[in-house]
Image (cartoon, rainbow, N blue to C red):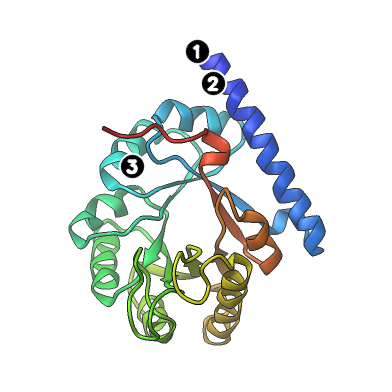
Amino acid sequence: MGMTDRKAQLAANLAKVEERIAAACAAAGRKREEVTLIVVTKTYPASDVRILSELGVRHVAENRDQDAAPKAVECSDLPLSWHFVGQLQTNKVRSVVGYADLVQSVDRSKLVTALSKEAVRVEREVGCLIQVALDAEEDGRGERGGVGVGGIEELGDLVANAPGLRLDGLMTVAPLTGIYAGRQQAAFERLMDLSTAMRRTHPAANMVSAGMSTDLEQAVAAGATHVRVGTAVLGVRPRLG
């Protein structure tokens, strides 16, 4: 596919997603500007990121450092905020802190320590979201990363007090198992309650990242401030391998 065709395709997809967000905001009695779209560009080339930037996208997300790092370098001239949304191993922290403005998958103290150390070293401030696992035991961990509800407060305090880091809020992925399986809106409403509790001690941590291509409407209805959309904008991902 030529670049002009790809641009037309992405523009059409973005317009559809924009309509969905606008309709969901209207239905929830919210202003459209209360919800920020983050386009998940994982497995897609830097050329797509460039087109998205031309089309007005300002937030992009990646979940694997080995894909994200070279792409971020290639697109470093663009006015973009890069979000890291995947499970993050401490040995990748140095690379990720080099380009990510925000890490949405903070879920353990060891990761906070590593992020803080690196952010201080390169003199950057990195925004952090605590990833909440709604499929985990109170103090457990989730299937796809994330901390159980009982661990949020302690981890939030840790981030808030860590040099080089900024506590921005909470993130979740709709769980596939447990009491919220198939009940996305209930899951996102639970996240909003947890966000309200967190803002009592950390008023600036008001970001709530929830909802993807299939359930962004439920996330907007629940009150999410950011939705992470990949497939609905970029198309079905090519199978790797």
Give the amino acid type for the residue marked by disc 1 in the picture.
Answer: Gly
Q: Secondary structure at mark 2?
A: helix
Q: Locate residue 128, reporting x and y percent.
A: 42, 66
Mark nearer the N terminus (3 vs 2) = 2
Viewport quadrant of the C terminus:
top left
Asked if 124 appears above or below 130 in the picture, the reply is above
Q: Is residue 40 left or right of residue 26?
A: left
Determine whether 113 is above or below 176 in the image.
below
Q: CA distance from mark 3 to mark 2?
A: 21 Å
Task: Quickly name the residue at label 3.
Answer: 68
Quarter where residue 165 is shown = bottom left
Label pair 2/1, CB-CB below 8 angstroms: yes
Nearest the camera: 79 or 144?
Answer: 144
Where, by quadrant of the figure, is residue 44 drawn? top left
Q: Is residue 38 left or right of residue 102?
A: right
**Structural crowding at the residue carrying mark 3, measured as other residues with C-alpha within 10 Å and reported as few (<14), some (14–19) or many (≥20):** many
Q: Residues within 10 Å of mark 2 (few under 14, many from 20)?
A: some
Task: Name the foreground residue: 16 vs 122.
Answer: 16
- Identify residue for label 2: 6
What amino acid type should be assigned to the residue bearing mark 3?
Ala
Q: Residue at 37% of width from left, 80% of height from top?
A: 155
Amino acid at the residue labelled 2: Arg
Name the residue that disc number 1 marks: 2
